[in-house]
Amino acid sequence: MSLITRLVASRLGLPPAARRPVGVERDLVAPMPDGVRLLADRYFPRDDGRAPLILMRSPYDRRGVWDYFAPVLAERGYQVLIQSTRGTVGSGGDFDPRYEADDGPATIEWIRRQPWFGGRMATWGASYLGYVQWALAGADVPEWKAAVIQDGPSEMYHAFFYHGGTFGLGNALRWLVSVYPLDRRRSPLRRIAGQVGALRGLRRGIAHLPLCDADRMSLGCTVGFFQRWLAHEELDEYWAAMDQRGRMSLLAAPVDLVAGWYDFFLPNTLANYAALREAGRRVRLLIGPWTHGAGGFSREAFGESFAWLEAHLKDEPIGLREAPVRLFVTGADRWVELDDWPPPVRAPSRWYLQPDGGLAANLPPDSPPDRYRYDPAHPTPNVGGPILAARAGGPRDNRRLEGRADVLTYTGRELDRDLEIVGPVSVELWVRSSLGHTDFFTRLCDVHPNGRSVNVCDGIIRLRPGRPAADADGLRRLLLELWPAAHQFRRGHRIRLQVSGGVHPRFARNLGTGEPLATSTTMRAADQEVFHDPKHPSAVLLPIR
């Protein structure tokens, strides 16, 4: 046991391990049915060559951080097999998530033939390492005793690429530049250099039109799978091949789900939890105050996930909580346990948009709509929230954003008592636009006594002609599903709702023409109206607990 592994274990909150030597086998080859060879590294306790196995399948570098993390688990009596998925870090073939439903079961068949496999295994991983676990769900794997899925989606279209019908440009490009340099057969130093160079080019790619050139602007080359993301704007067979939700009821292994309030996969994770519960599967859920990927190595999440493995791989159920759901209430900075998600609440409380920028529980009086112009040539920027950039994401001060002419705000009075919401949040918005093609973005904020406006959750919707239909006066009723939340607005704070036309580059700006996403360059500004009167009572619906 090295000093580094002791420090890592201490950081993760694990108890001291017995002194045991750890072995490593590099570049093990698993052949796939089509002849492609996938590479893997195996870490194992030398005094137990057939210890329970933890499988991680990843498109990212299988060295680096894993050289410190995997030995921590091996010292505690586990084998750890880290496999590079197709087309990454020396594995053959081309990277494409559509292969995972075949490569996962083929990898299991290979594992079964290895002399070091003792017949019991678990899967573990975050983000794409979670997606590959859902892709394995339909396979017959009786040896699969537990799954730890952290921020991992079961489908890609809604969860990542086209939430609300809008293309998640910023997240897509950031993921591209993190994955694509690993797609080349390079040395570790050259892979790192490639990623650094790609990150420098990211700003050029984000600002460029047409979007079909964004990969070339960021990486210096055209990437096939990025082009396919753009080309398939609508939900079709391409995305159906990456949708694992139909396999979920077949997953027999108990599942430990970890999510964050500021993770872009949160809505999908909660839908996965509900589906597993409905199917009668054993599942547990932890939601913390994290951005994407930040929770998995926290003491809270790692400790619970490790206990999950101990219980199901070694039959040592020490430290398992009884409540199926544990979540962090932001604003109150405390953890609570629940019997289910969402918790039972009375009908959501409606807070109506008022004239002069107010927000209140009473219906608004007769009043003219508020107006703003959204200009894609000067797009409304993103501030914080669920983005693939930990330092820029999460809760942020929105005051500068709210000072823009293309952002409307509606703010309630100071609260005379604490107000806590736990559950789904939505916005009913009555709008009219000068264009048939446009977006509306709404964000719920907590305004502190010093004026600081902190984002809690948000959502976006893309409008097309007739979707949704307009009335005779051109008004449309929108229902936006925001990210769920568990948040306490403290006494003396105020509740605020933002309305705008987008958040670039988190979501690709709507150019207003309806032309193909990949090739469009023509931009049209949209004049937007937001209504708040008795016949058109725009409101935010809060799950007050």
Image (tube, grey):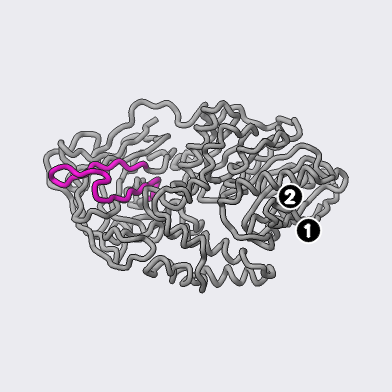
**In the depicted view, which residue is nearer to us: 380 or 141?**
141
The local secondary structure at tag 1 comes to strand
Q: Tell me if mark 2 has few (under 14), some (14-19) or many (20+) residues whose alpha carbon lies within 10 angstroms of its own.
A: many
Q: Residue 170, position in %: x, y?
A: 44, 60
- The residue at 65%/34% (across/down) is 253
**In the depicted view, which residue is nearer to us: 483 or 95?**
95
- Check residue 464 for magenta coloring: yes
Query: In the displayed structure, would residue 52 be above or below residue 525?
Result: above
Q: On the picture, is 19 further left or further right than 447?
A: right
Which range of residues does the magenta coloring cover? 454-481
Q: On the picture, is 38 further left or further right than 397?
A: right
Query: In the displayed structure, would residue 312 be above or below residue 30?
Result: above
Q: Is residue 448 visible?
A: no
Amino acid at pointer 1: Arg
Q: Residue 446, position in %: x, y?
A: 36, 46
Q: Residue 544, position in %: x, y?
A: 37, 32
| Residue 426 lies in quadrant | top left
Q: For mark 1, what is the residue?
A: 26
Q: For mark 2, what is the residue?
A: 81
Which residue ends up furthest to the front in the rendered image?
34
Q: On the picture, is 386 further left or further right than 528?
A: right
Q: Is residue 260 visible?
A: yes
- The residue at 21%/54% (across/down) is 528
The local secondary structure at tag 2 comes to strand
For marks 1 and 2, give the CA distance.
10 Å
Which residue ends up furthest to the right in the rendered image?
47
Q: On the picture, is 492 further left or further right than 123?
A: left
| Residue 26 lies in quadrant | bottom right
| Numbered mark located on residue 260 in the image | none
